[in-house]
Amino acid sequence: MYPRKSLTLAITAGLMFGIGACSMQEKSQTKKEGHTVKDDRAAVSEHDEGRQDALSGRDRINAMQIESPPAPPAPPAPPPLISGVDAKFAAPAATTSKIAREAVAIGTIAAPPVNQAQAGDINRENYADHDDNAVMRVAEQPVSTFSIDVDTGSYTNVRRMLNDGQLPPRDAVRAEEFINYFDYAYAPPVDRKTPFAVHTEVAPTPWNARHQLMLVGIKGYEIAASEIPAANIVFLIDSSGSMGSPDKIGLLKQSFMAMVPRLREQDRISIVVYAGSAGLVLPPTSGAEHETILAAFDRLSAGGSTNGAAGIELAYQQAKRAYIEGGVNRVILATDGDFNVGTVDMEALKTLVAEQRRSGVSLTTLGFGQGNYNDELSEQLADIGNGNHAYIDTLNEGHKVLVEEMSSTLFTIAKDVKIQVEFNPAVVAEYRLIGYENRMLATEDFNNDAVDAGEIGAGHDVTAIYEVVLAGSGAESVDPLRYGANATIKHSGDELAFVKLRYKQPDADTSTLIERPIKLSEMAKEASPRLQFAAAVAAFADRLRGGEHLGQFDLAQIAKLANAARNDDRFGYQREFVDLVNRAQALSGEAQAIAVVSE
């Protein structure tokens, strides 16, 4: 019911063998310094454009899926990252995902590491500071306005950390990206005149029975891959020395090569690399030239320092060179975000991305690797570039983003999508939006078509959750005003809130309005499995950030809630989520969390 479009069973079995190349990563010792975690990663090989491979392109894909490189020599035993955790994290099999357990059992991938790092490693990963949204008193601030966000990079990046035996830095956790990683099986719109359908639900909060959760979900219409307009795609690949490890350039190549068989004759593909300088590896080429494209990817290697700004400029030049009127024109930037050459003017870089967005070329960013991953910059560039940001931690995730979700990754069905919720002060005393801290807008921005907002791709869904306190419930956390207008407010029917959405068609400059009330009569005594699972995901993000809003609702209860709500979990994403809660429980030292039910 909830997992996003994923691998077919046959492809999943084949890709398990390829994951081995990505699972034998160097592990990094984590040290929190403000909001930044530092790491020093050495450069490796030189870029070798002349290497030839005797295998055909399709044979290379097959070999990629069934062969794993030999394991590297074991690093010297390091001290534990978190003292007192290792014994607890020598976990039972139930704390490992089904796919990983089966792969380990047949010897195709290495067992997950247990909280280890190479001696001398220093992390320098970068995450933007952000505080949780505050509890708002409706009598003072009845309107909440924000841009949608379809990014999922925070969830998969944190998944990587937990699977590596590390608790994430607080600012690496963005609740909306956890929630939106999962598909909640919303019904799509009945026709394409309206690009998405709106769904709402209200039910008691699992961690506080006197509070309510109000879910607002939107579902975009779906199209088959064959219906995507002709696509002009420029792959902009960081080939600097910091990308030299298997979880970076190696995983990047495998992920992109898996996408190639889906490319069509009408598509145009270019490949630009950047290290100390930028270079054109593949000029605009027909998507039907699979062998040529595969060979270009296969030649990639890493070496040198990083000059990302020069690479982006060259990528946009190629995008303009092959621009398809009425088609998809997109740069896909794959990097660890380590922009480290000279003085890089980030504001000028953001301005360039914004200008190119207005000219019709969007930007998607894909994050790879660990140790020097620049999450903050990768997310910001995608937001400015009318694209999405994903983090690729496994070949399975690469296939999910670039193959199974190719339509939603490439094809935008609505842009500048904004949500505004007005709460009825006669019914609601307080509210708190979970997540979206860096997507908040001013109230007046909702009707201002000049204000940029997020995009939604074909088949994408977006979920927002408010925690609300009803008036007169006795659960208010903020004292009412002594001299306020709220005493004179009259009851407005049975409306709890009024939801408005604005969006633009991809080629339009004027927005369209959708609106609907949420009535008290819609409030359920018990949440649906959909809302229960979404609540568990939101609670997990909150707990990883310190659990300020959860009271005594701990990881064991989160795991129990999620496990009970699992439904139609054919590809194991919900099951894997419960596994991650168990891993976090083991690392944090909380009481025993629930083991995943065997199937």
Image: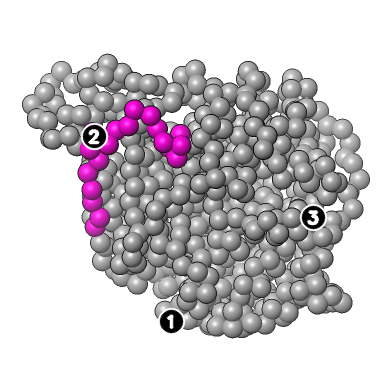
Q: Could you tell me which secondary element the residue under label 1 belongs to? A: loop
What amino acid type is highlighted by mark number 1? Glu
Q: Earlier in the sequence, mark 1 or mark 2?
A: 1
Q: Where's the C terminus, which quadrant?
A: top right
Name the residue located 72 percent from the left edge and 71 percent from the top edge.
297
Measure how far apart labels 3 and 1 are at the Cα level. Answer: 41 Å
Measure how far apart labels 3 and 2 are at the Cα level. Answer: 52 Å
Residue 324 is situated, as x and y percent measured from the top left of the image, at: 47, 81
For label 3, the residue is 17
What amino acid type is highlighted by mark number 2? Ser
Name the residue located 33 percent from the left edge and 51 percent from the top edge.
198
Q: Which residues are magenta?
A: 513-532
Name the residue located 27 percent from the left edge and 36 percent from the top edge.
522
Location of residue 121 with respect to 11 vertically, above or below: above
Which label sits on residue 521? 2
Viewer-nearest of discs 3 and 1: 3
- Magenta stretch containing residue 523, yes or no? yes
